[in-house]
Image: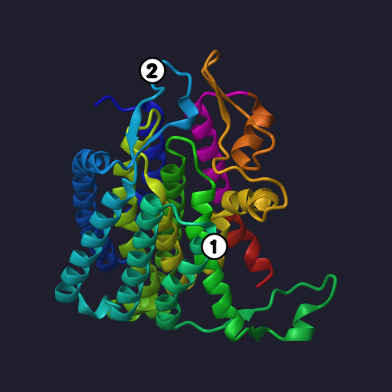
Amino acid sequence: MIFDKSLLGFIGICCLPPILLLIYLPNVSLQWIIVQSGFFSFGAGLLTYKLIPSVAELTSQANLTGMDLNKRGDPKFSGKKIPESLGICVAVVYLVCVILFQTFQWFSFPETIQLSEYNAALTSICFMILLGFGDDVLNLRWRYKLILPMFASLPLLVAYAGGTTVVVPDINFPVPLREWLGMVFDLGIFYRIYLLMLAIFCTNSINILAGINGLEVGQSVVIATSIIIHNLIELTIASHSPLSTAATNSAISTVSPHLFSLILMIPFLFTTISLLFYNWYPSRVFVGDTYTYFSGMCFAVVAILCHFSKTLLLFFIPQILNFLYSVPQLFGIIPCPRHRVPKFNPETGKMEAIPTNLTIINLLLMITGPLTERKLCVYLLIFQGFCSCIGFGIRYFVAPYFF
């Protein structure tokens, strides 16, 4: 197989920062746990890469195939049936990897394991995999896609052990908030409703920003990398705290939420990268709603159970912008076609915007003019990465001035 240079460059850029942060992590015990998780995840990635062609044959035999709408009129690809729902392969390998590492963790370093969080996470992720695969097979209506994630999120809310108070920002315009509300404010049940809405948004937002070869998987790689970098930064900060220098066990206890997040995100990143090799332009497999719901729930799980839900939203800036731009169509104010992708011009070989399809994909094409599908995906992933950099800037340089 000949790999695309832009794909290899994208993967290298995503993998380098976490590796450097891991090398400079001062706590050797945490380093070793993360490296062990990396070995399991690397094996899961290789297994995913090997299994995808076989699973693609099975989905093709089950008539789970589709046409690439962005290549109609292209003599090389037009009319070619492409296997769909390959997200099921990634999701199953991911679950097996996490369960195996959970067992390994239980015997090797049981003081770090969080059984209730593990079980809640796996339950919610399994539910969304089932919903996604059911959508691929049964073509569910949107009302079910909004209602069912609520039930999938309930195990997370039950296992959520964090507080429901928020720190009130030190803002005096237009009103002095802290004089009115105090330093902290307890949202009570409304905070749990917010977490529920976050899970629903995450599971649907990646599905909404889709339709270009490599886009769904590529944006998931960027978001997962951002979460891993955030976790490693927080681990490094906690390892330098006075509590962590007293004893290794106290250090692990202090940073366990971010360690737990890494244990869930590292195998996700490896298995997703394996899928990206097949989903990159020109795509040989389609990921289906199985993958988009699976990836969205993975992000929601770590954000909710590891207490960085607001930081996660900073990594979802493109998805939030796409949702806001799409609101008139999503809520039926203006007609909404089933597929809101740009149109392919077979004469130029480029994608052209359809202004009435309200997505940031079409908005980008209106700004830049026609682009090839590969270049369009690369530009969107660059934008995703740029927004993640903005998110890190807000989280670590702007937020301290207000909290």
Coordinates of residue 282 in the picture (x, y in percent): 38, 28
Q: Which residue is mark 2?
A: 76
Whether residue 128 appears in this view of the structure is yes
The magenta stretch spans residue 342:
no
Q: Is residue 138 above or below residue 112?
A: above
Dividing the picture into quadrants, the one containing residue 400 is: bottom right
Tell me the chief SS of the magenta region. helix
Q: Nearer the viewer, residue 193 or 142?
A: 142
The three-letter amino acid code for the residue at tag 2 is Lys
| Marks 1 and 2, the one that precedes in the sequence | 2
Q: Residue at (70%, 51%) from the top-left corner? A: 328
- Classify mark 2: residues with Cα within 10 Å, few (<14), some (14-19) or many (20+): few
- Above or below — where is 255 with respect to 396? below
Residue 383 is covered by the magenta coloring = yes
Quick one: quadrant of the C terminus?
bottom right
Q: Secondary structure at mark 2?
A: loop
Spatial CA span between label 1 and label 2: 38 Å
Residue depicted at 46% across the width and 52% down the height:
223
Residue highlighted by disc 1: 143
Q: Which residues are magenta?
A: 370-389
What's the residue type where badge 1 is placed? Arg
Q: Tell me how the rendering is colored.
A: rainbow
**In this view, 401 is above or below 205:** below
Quarter holding the N terminus?
top left
Is residue 247 visible in the rendered image? The answer is no
Residue appearing at x 38%, y 17% in the figure: 76
